[in-house]
């Protein structure tokens, strides 16, 4: 099931005796192959590529190499994209952050009437995480009915607990308000303005042989996302709106940079979403979004002080690239962050 790290602020103070170099980062990534790492690390600074390295094959069976254009799954990095779309519709006056869900659904049970869009977006609604597997068929309205009829695991607003289903409900509301699919809405508000043509569910037209292939923790082939059940317009609603979009390392880097450099949202909105990057020592901090399904794992990190973007992705269930994130960040910051 898709997961996401809540925004991670990682210290990047260096402890190496000698400054890292592209060669030392390459050697470190190569050493991870012994731990079953198979994937890519891509680095930009101020919009210019500074590092790219691949380990293993995008498809080991076909011996097809990873490239900058290999399709990858971003997992729960879809969630901040949905939040951007929410903020943009709020700006347009289409809805309000404190609108209750009862404004968008009929017959909302009493225990759920206090749930607002803000509470949904902050994982504080009380819905359980999932209502089925990522690739289990589930229509939108079927999922919404299940959610509204379900027992909440806590009183809305009481605490924060991660919920993929909550973002599927948020995406449903955005669809109802805009009259567009969540993919079409995000494409219009975020992807097209940035020139992203290979990011989305079905709109980019990906084919399985253009995507990275996942392997399970037992070493057996899992395949690509498109080898699993999808409707004609996208994946199951167990996944839609909370994860599952396909992209490339370069396009994800472009979106990440625009998100953090106010190309998509205002500085004030960014402060609400990423307060840790608006403090005095932010030049030595990284904000990281991550997503995966225990087979593939993708991380997008950004440092505002040096305008560094790091995209890292792995495709073997025996290894998760986010577990090496701090080491990669230290290496990259050592290469690019010092005067």
Image (spheres, rainbow, N blue to C red):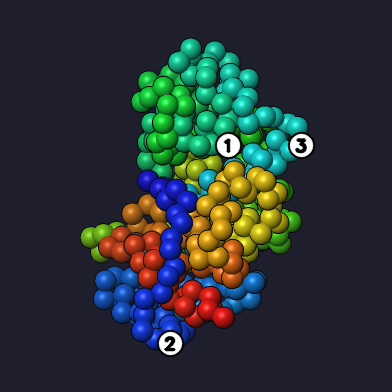
Q: Is residue 9 visible?
A: yes
Name the residue tied to disc 2. 23
Q: Please, is residue 226 above or below residue 115 in the view?
A: below
Residue 94 image offset from top left, x and y in percent: 73, 31
**Between 296 and 76, which is closer to the camera in this rendering?**
76
Q: Which residue sits at x=42%, y=51%?
A: 5
Farthest residue, direction left? 218
Residue 284 image offset from top left, x and y in percent: 50, 66
User: Would you say 45 lies left or right of 74 here?
Assistant: right
- Is tag 3's residue or tag 2's residue first in the polypeptide sequence? 2
Name the residue tied to disc 3. 92
- Which mark is nearer the camera, 2 or 1? 2
Name the residue tied to disc 1. 171
- Which mark is nearer the camera, 1 or 3? 3
Q: Which residue sits at x=63%, y=76%?
A: 48
Q: Please, is residue 214 above or below residue 81 in the view?
A: below
Disc on res. 183: none
**Between 4 and 40, which is closer to the camera in this rendering?**
4
């Amino acid at each position: 099931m898709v997961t996401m790290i809540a925004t991670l602020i990682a210290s990047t103070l260096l402890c190496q005796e000698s400054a890292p170099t592209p060669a030392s980062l390459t050697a470190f990534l190569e050493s991870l192959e012994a731990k079953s790492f198979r994937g890519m690390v891509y680095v930009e600074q101020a919009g210019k590529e500074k590092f790219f390295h691949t380990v293993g094959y995008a498809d080991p069976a076909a011996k097809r190499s990873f490239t900058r254009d290999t399709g990858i799954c971003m997992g729960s990095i879809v969630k901040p994209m949905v939040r951007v779309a929410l903020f943009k519709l709020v700006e347009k006056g289409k809805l309000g952050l404190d609108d209750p869900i009862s404004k968008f659904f009929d017959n909302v049970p009493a225990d759920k009437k206090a749930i607002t869009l803000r509470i949904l977006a902050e994982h504080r609604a009380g819905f359980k995480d999932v209502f089925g597997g990522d690739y289990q068929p589930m229509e939108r309205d079927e999922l919404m009915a299940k959610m509204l009829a379900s027992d909440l695991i806590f009183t809305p607003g009481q605490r924060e607990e991660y919920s993929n289903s909550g973002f599927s409900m948020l995406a449903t509301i955005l669809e109802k308000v805009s009259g567009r699919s969540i993919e079409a809405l995000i494409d219009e508000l975020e992807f097209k303005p940035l020139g992203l043509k290979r990011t989305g569910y079905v709109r980019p037209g990906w084919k399985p042989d253009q995507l990275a292939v996942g392997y399970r923790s037992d070493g057996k082939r899992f395949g690509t996302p498109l080898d699993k059940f999808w409707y004609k317009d996208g994946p199951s609603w167990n996944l839609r709106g909370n994860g599952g979009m396909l992209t490339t390392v370069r396009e994800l880097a472009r979106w990440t940079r625009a998100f953090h450099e106010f190309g998509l949202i205002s500085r004030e909105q960014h402060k609400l979403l990423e307060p840790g990057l608006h403090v005095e020592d932010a030049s030595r901090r990284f904000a990281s979004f991550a997503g995966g399904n225990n087979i593939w794992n993708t991380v997008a990190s950004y440092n505002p002080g040096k305008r560094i973007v790091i995209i890292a992705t792995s495709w073997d269930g025996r290894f998760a690239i986010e577990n090496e994130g701090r080491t990669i960040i230290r290496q990259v910051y050592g290469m690019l962050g010092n005067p």
